[in-house]
Amino acid sequence: MTSVSTELVSSKAVEAEKEAKARFWRRVPGYVVAYIVLGLGAVISLFPYFLALVTSLKAPDQVFSSSSWSLPNPLTFQNYIDVVVKYNFLSFIWHSLLYAGLLTIGQLIFSTLAAYAFARMEFPGREQIFMLYLATLMVPAIVTLIPLFIILRTFGLVNTWFGLVLPYVLGTPFGIFLMRQFFLTIPKDLENAARIDGASTMQIMFQVILPLSRPIMATLAIITFVQAWNTFLWPLIITDSTSLRVLTVGIAAFQSNFGTQWNLMMAATFIALGPLLLLFFLFQKHIVRSIHMSGFK
Amino acid sequence: MQGQDTLGIDQSPVSRVKERYRLQPSTKLSLQAYAFLLPSFLGLLVFSLIPIIAVAVISFFSWSLIGQPTFVGLKNYATMFSSSSFWHSLLLTFYYVLLNIPMQTVFALLLALLLNQKIPGRGIFRTIFVVPWMATAVAMGIVWQWIFDPQYGTLNTFLGVLHITGPAWLSSPGWALPAIAAVNIWQYTGYNMLFFLAGLQGIPPDFYEATSLDGATPIQQFFTITLPLLSPTMFFVLVTDVIGSAQVFDTVYAMTKGGPGDATSVLNFNIFRQAFEFFHAGYASALSMVLFAILLIITLLQVLFFRSRAIYDLS
């Protein structure tokens, strides 16, 4: 009895295995095509980074004597040393870090406060004010650029840190929207319980809400930092001295002077691209999530 | 969401009545809410709302950014509509959007369909495809300039291996804008793929099973199930891509500075030069208003188009 049933089972298992194998082999051509397309996509996605890196490690005479994608031989860090030391990039890097850092801190503080008010507090005009924030998301950046410049010039803030940072440091509609959507998902009972215990709104913020919001705040911080790091047009317009120059503007200025010295140019660009690449692989989950959350309401 | 949640501790009717006649503690909470909002609202007002109104006002003035603006009525708009460089930059912008959108959307959808299969390693591919989205556009523009270099660049070297003589790309009036569009496609295909992937994962598998029992081929299924059910995603992707690519600036600045000649002088670049190189603040504001109006109209048309076609919720 038992032997018969095990035999039955095992023959069934063998058959299932055979079928799975057959199914696998039937899928192989599809897999091959899929991997060729995906592999090609991956190579194209990463190639410009690879090219910038290998070119930046080449001596000037190798740049034009061998194909552009060949590996550096000999390997040299001289381009980076030149760019950073001779051409002042250390200060540009510092300005970019400071700019992106300040915007990130401002975003975290002010967007969180505003988002909490929109998500959890009662006040007249709440929905209308929120709609006003959302409506400004639809206005292209270039539209406000000229008046923005004029306003800051009126206050004498052209070419100052205040002028550079002020328009974006008080929180953005996107940041507020992102945080508000998250706050709405936190159960109200948690806050009510704290309120019964006599906690003030501030205490609730710091002891109940913020500890629960760490992942979303990390997401917002990364996205704000990356966007600020990449910003070009605003710093280009509002600053005109090297004492305030951020990396993006520094690279563009460097390009007009050293446009065909590709080894130097690629070192300069990789200084901007490299850190974000690292950031991406460290925080890819947060970054992918932030993309999803910025897209769907 | 409404009402007394923040204070909703008391349950008895008596205390509720009492509460109504007490000095409202919610007034204090409202003030607190306004205090929370104040910094960001000041920012919105001064750096966003006022500029939006101001740009419309400035567009009726002639102003070199220095000295007194003079009211000129509709003259900026009249100049604009009779200026060939305006029409040229407008056409270039449309052309650029057209170069971008179809390819970017098709590639993104194709990659999403592939990654929606349960194949090993799809997580790694997904990650890699999103990397370009983070790239600093100015820096990446310069890297692509190196790729497009007519003599030593990767692309023409590669084409040379295939015995094709590549064009001069960025210094050729016909190829410069398509080359910039290629960079944009490179940067945003993976980003759009993520949205399509999320959209595909939201389609119930039963739909496919039911129709494949009826003998539908995968291609039929794609057109009768996948594409209609993806229309909300498609809508989002198309709207954001049209708006985004119509505002291209960083890559143009880094790669061609509007050249050769004015072959890549798209509207956004034109606005920048008018305002901050030639100091025609009024004229540049009028250009900005036109760009804004066009984007608004395109978005509305897209909404109407998808309303009429989509059976599914567009939220």
Image: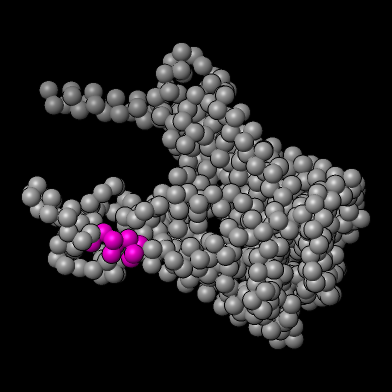
Q: Position of residue B231 (x, y in %)?
A: 54, 31
Residue drawn where x is 78% and y is 75% of the image: A254
- Any part of residue A164 in sight: yes
Residue B26 falls within the magenta-colored stretch: yes
Looking at the rendering, the stretch of residues picked out in magenta corresponds to B25-33
Q: Give the left or right position of residue B73, taking residue B221 as reference.
A: right
* Image position, residue B23 (x, y; %): 21, 61
Q: Nearer the viewer, residue B135 or A98?
A: A98
Which residue sits furthest bottom? A85
Q: How is the image coloured?
A: one colour
Q: Is residue A30 magenta?
A: no
Q: Is residue A29 visible?
A: no
Q: Is residue B312 above or below residue A52?
A: above
Q: Name the side, left or right, on which B315 lies relative to A95.
A: left
Residue at the location (73% across, 53% down)? Answer: B288
Q: Position of residue B289 (x, y in %)?
A: 72, 50
Which residue sits at x=82%, y=42%?
A: B91
Residue A110, relative to residue A128: is it above or below?
below
Task: Characterize the magenta stretch by its predominant secondary structure.
Answer: helix
Q: Nearer the viewer, residue A204 or A281?
A: A204
Can you tell which quarter of the image residue B136 is in? bottom right
- Which residue is pictured at 65% across the width and 83% down the height? A91
Residue B271: % across, % down: 78, 57
